[in-house]
Amino acid sequence: MTSQLLPLGWAVLGAGLGWGVGRLCLGLERWTGLVREPEAGERMGPTWLERWALPVLGAATFALFAARQGLTTALLIHSLWLLVMLQVLIFDLKHRLILDAVTFPTLVGALVLAHWSPPVTLDASMLGALFGGGVLLPLAVISDLLHGGRGFGWGDVKLGMVIGAVTGLNFASGDLFTLQALLAGALIGGVVSVALLATRRRGLRDGVPYGPFLAVGAVITLLFM
C-alpha cells in the first residue's frame, strides 16, 4: 500500500511544485523584460504553459520517478533536477532563452549534492560538466558564426554543463550518463526537427530551441539511473 501511495502523493507534490515553477517563470520573465524587448511572436505574461503544462508535467514526472526509484535520497535530489529541467523546457519554448540565473546556481548545487546522489560522485559530476559543455561548445560557435546565434546558443552550452553535473560521467565504472543524456536529447531533437520540416511548420532557416530536447534527454537519463 505504501509503495502505491508514494507515486500518488509525489504526483500531487509535483503538480504543486510545477505550478510554483510557473510562477517563477513569470517572475523571471518580468525580470528579463526589463533588460530586453520581446522578440517578434514572443508572448509575455501567463499562458497555458504556466497554467496547465507545468503542473501536469510536474505531476506526471514526479509520479514516474517515485514509482521507479522509491522514497530514496536519489528521488529527492532527482526531483530537484526535474524542476530545473521543467523550468528550462517551458522558458526556452516560450522565449528561446536559458537563463544564467537558473543554470549557474544549479551547476553549483549539483556539485555540492553529488556526494549524496549515487551513482554520481563529485569527480563524476565535475567530469560530466566539462564533457557536457565541451561537446556542445563547438555547436554554439558554429551556430554563432553561421546563423548569428539563432538555434544552438551559449545557454545550451551552459545547460549541457548542468546536465553533465547532475548525471555524472565515469569512464572507469562505465557510468556514461552524461553521454546518454546528450545523445537522447540529440535524437529527440533530430526527430522533432525532421517532423517540423516535413510538415512545413519550420523552414531550414528557422531557428529551433534545443534546450527543451536536452532537458527531456536529461530527465529520461535521470529516470533510469
Image: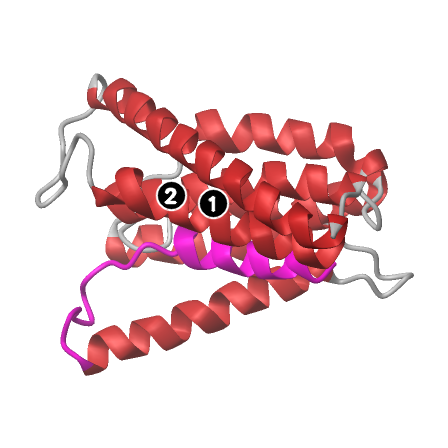
Was residue 92 drawn as part of the magenta stretch in this picture?
no
Amino acid at circle 2: Leu
Find disc 1 in the rendering and name its residue. Answer: 58
The reply to whether residue 135 is in sight is no
Is residue 57 shown left or right of residue 78? left
Magenta segment, which residues?
Answer: 199-225
- Look at the numbered discs 1 and 2 and tell me whether their residues touch, using CB distance below 8 Å: yes
Q: Which x, y percent locates residue 182?
A: 57, 61
Q: Which x, y percent locates residue 204?
A: 20, 71
Say if 38 sits above or below 82 in the image: above
- What secondary structure is found at the residue carrying circle 2? helix
Find disc 2 in the rendering and name its residue. Answer: 54
Was residue 218 drawn as part of the magenta stretch in this picture?
yes
Q: Quadrant of the C terminus?
A: bottom right
CA gap between label 1 and label 2 equals 6 Å
Question: How are the residues colored?
Answer: secondary structure
Closer-to-camera residue (187/142): 187
Is residue 125 shown left or right of residue 13? right
Q: Residue at x 75, y 41 (%)?
A: 126
Say if 169 sits above or below 126 in the image: below
